[in-house]
Amino acid sequence: MENVTATVWIAACAHRLQQQRHTVDPLDLEEVAHGLWRDERLRAMSPDQAAVDWLRPINTTDDR
């Protein structure tokens, strides 16, 4: 995602995380998204893809 600024990527990722985790404080999710931005592998993905990938282990556990 080379053409997206860090600020936009982080905001979009935090928004996607919020869609999945309604009870978590949005400021906390923004901090999480900032941490995801620091991960080169996740940063190369779209913000939505990165959020889904990061949440995959949690969502798998929720399904049990």
Image (cartoon, helix red, strand yellow):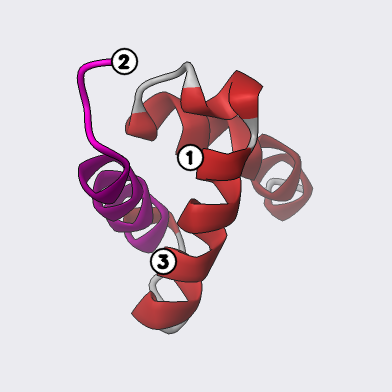
Measure the C-alpha gap from mark 3 to mark 1: 11 Å
Q: Tag on residue 18?
A: none
Q: Are marks 2 and 3 in contact (CB under 8 Å)?
A: no
- Residue density around tag 1, few if under 14, some if 14–19, many if 20 or more, within 10 Å: many
Q: Quadrant of residue 32?
A: bottom right
Q: Secondary structure at mark 3?
A: helix
Report the magenta stretch's main SS.
Answer: helix
Q: Is residue 14 above or below residue 1?
A: below
Residue 45 or residue 21, whichever sits in front? 45
Of badges 2 and 1, nearer the viewer stands 2
Residue ID for mark 3: 30
Question: Is 32 on the left or on the right of 62, as rendered?
Answer: left
The quadrant the N terminus occupies is top left
Residue ID for mark 1: 51
- Residue density around tag 3, few if under 14, some if 14–19, many if 20 or more, within 10 Å: some
Of badges 3 and 1, nearer the viewer stands 3
Residue 47 or residue 38, whichever sits in front? 38
Residue ID for mark 2: 2
Residue 61 or residue 5, whichever sits in front? 5
Measure the C-alpha gap from mark 2 to mark 1: 17 Å
Q: Position of residue 49 (x, y in %)?
A: 43, 25
* Residue in view at x 71 percent, y 50 percent: 58
Q: Is residue 32 above or below residue 6?
A: below
Type of the residue with mark 1: Ala
* Residue in view at x 42 percent, y 54 percent: 17
Type of the residue with mark 3: Glu
Q: Secondary structure at mark 1?
A: helix
Q: Which residues are magenta?
A: 1-18
Question: Is 15 on the left or on the right of 20, as rendered?
Answer: left
Q: Is residue 20 visible?
A: yes
Q: Position of residue 55 (x, y in %)?
A: 61, 44
Q: Are marks 2 and 1 in contact (CB under 8 Å)?
A: no
